[in-house]
Amino acid sequence: MEEVGDFCGIATWHPAIEKCVLSADGKQRTLSVKGGGTVVEALEKWDDANRSYTYTILSGPLPVANYHSTISVGADPKGSALKWMGKYDAKGVPDADSKKTMDGVYEAGAKSLTGS
């Protein structure tokens, strides 16, 4: 799953992302969301050995604050296994609504990558 290994590659596999622009130092990405909106994220940690990276949302329309997420690709007998987890606080909406929104983000991306 080479698509995941590129910090700005999310634009090629996540159905909600129209475009990704990477900063000159490669540590910040600006995502243009289909239908409008911009999300700015910062790379916190890159781990080649574990085929993962951790990032945080700096700004955007998502109903979250203090967002930190790690996405990784591991070995699986059928090919590769995707793991995408985030920790965050709800912002401006009840916890359940924030969770529903973020679960939708993860599920749409995972479905696009894995076809399931």
Image: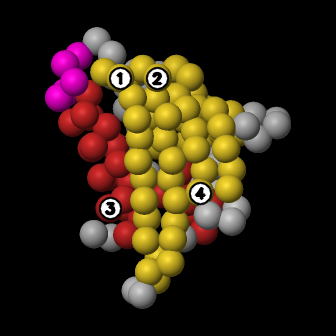
Nearer to us in this view, 62 or 88: 88
- Give the labeled residue for mark 1: 89
Q: Quadrant of the rendered structure where residue 51 is?
A: bottom right
Question: What amino acid is at disc 1?
Answer: Asp
Contact between marks 2 and 1 (CB within 8 A): the answer is: yes
User: Which quadrant of the rendered structure holds the N terminus?
Assistant: bottom right
Query: In whole angstroms, how far apart are the C-alphas of marks 3 and 4?
Result: 18 Å
- Give the labeled residue for mark 2: 66
Query: In whole angstroms, how far apart are the C-alphas of marks 3 and 1?
Result: 25 Å
Q: Main secondary structure of the magenta part?
A: helix
Whether residue 36 appears in this view of the structure is no
Q: Secondary structure at mark 1?
A: strand
Residue 108 in the image: above or below residue 40 = below
Q: Secondary structure at mark 2?
A: strand
Q: Which mark's residue is nearer the viewer, 2 or 3?
A: 2
Question: What amino acid is at disc 4?
Answer: Ser
Contact between marks 3 and 4 (CB within 8 A): the answer is: no
Question: What amino acid is at disc 3?
Answer: Lys
- Give the labeled residue for mark 4: 52
Residues shaded magenta: 93-97
Work out whether mark 2 precedes mark 3 in sequence or the reverse, and give the earlier one. Answer: 2
Q: Which mark's residue is nearer the viewer, 3 or 1?
A: 1
- Give the labeled residue for mark 3: 111
Work out whether mark 4 precedes mark 1 in sequence or the reverse, and give the earlier one. Answer: 4
